[in-house]
Amino acid sequence: MRRASARGIAVVAAASALFGGAVALAPAALAAAPETGAITIAAPASVTAGDTFDVTISAPAATDLFAYELTIGFDPALISYDDATGSFPYGGFDSVSSGSGTVSFTHTRLGTSPGLTGSLSLITFSFTALTDGLADIDLESATFISSTSETATLGAPVTATTTVVAAPTPEPSATPEPSATPEPSATPTPSTSAEPASSEGSGPLAITGADAAVWIIAGLIAAAVIGLGVVLVLRRRAVTR
């Protein structure tokens, strides 16, 4: 994708015009395309659905990097760009634009500021993992501009892949079995109080009180009479012999 970004150039031109920039004043003899080295994308190897994670795009060997624009592509069904995230190099003007499955980052130095040199973190931003799958994060295109308005573009897309793992399903907690309700203790049946022996018998021969005494005396008298009769009979027999 060797084509200069018109938008990136427009940003640099506007910044230079506004701040009396070095682009228009730089001697032509010094003009040179910016260098970046092999662009890299750092992203976690795996994340869990629901997690937020950072991605960093770096230039390991920048030379006179005055402005740049980076366009990132991703699968919006697997990950989503977290709006308002983007950490650029200190100093200058930054902008972010995002759509469905794409986000672009632009950074430019201002006025007579020198271009950036050395190992640089060009942008750090965040995604949120949505569902399980292999999420490719592609640097689809990039345009780099020097302080003398020379441009360079990304030779080939750069890709990092993050595996999104489904969040574990929490096991339902075991419902505690209700403790056995203790059975109510049997209410002791009140013992039947022994009824006092009735002074009156239930049969026809039952006797009680004064009636009993009368019958006892009568019985003794009858027994005495019978005994006396027996004695008399015996005596009479003895006499008759």
Image (cartoon, rainbow, N blue to C red):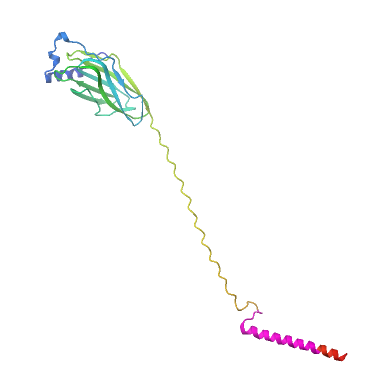
Quadrant in the picture for residue 236:
bottom right
Q: Where's residue 214, x and y in %?
A: 65, 86
Q: Quadrant of the C terminus?
A: bottom right
Q: Relative to 105, is 152 above or below?
A: above
Q: Where's residue 71, x and y in %?
A: 26, 21
Residue extending farthest right:
241
Please tell me which residue lies in front, 220 or 176.
220
Locate residue 134 relative to residue 178 in the image: left or right.
left
Quadrant in the picture for residue 41:
top left
Q: Residue at x 74, y 88 (%)?
A: 225
Q: Relative to 144, is 164 above or below?
A: below
Q: Relative to 115, is 239 above or below?
A: below
Q: Please, what is the dominant secondary structure of the magenta stretch?
A: helix
Please tell me which residue lies in front, 15 or 184.
184
Residue 229 among magenta residues: yes
Q: What stretch is highlighted in magenta?
A: 204-232
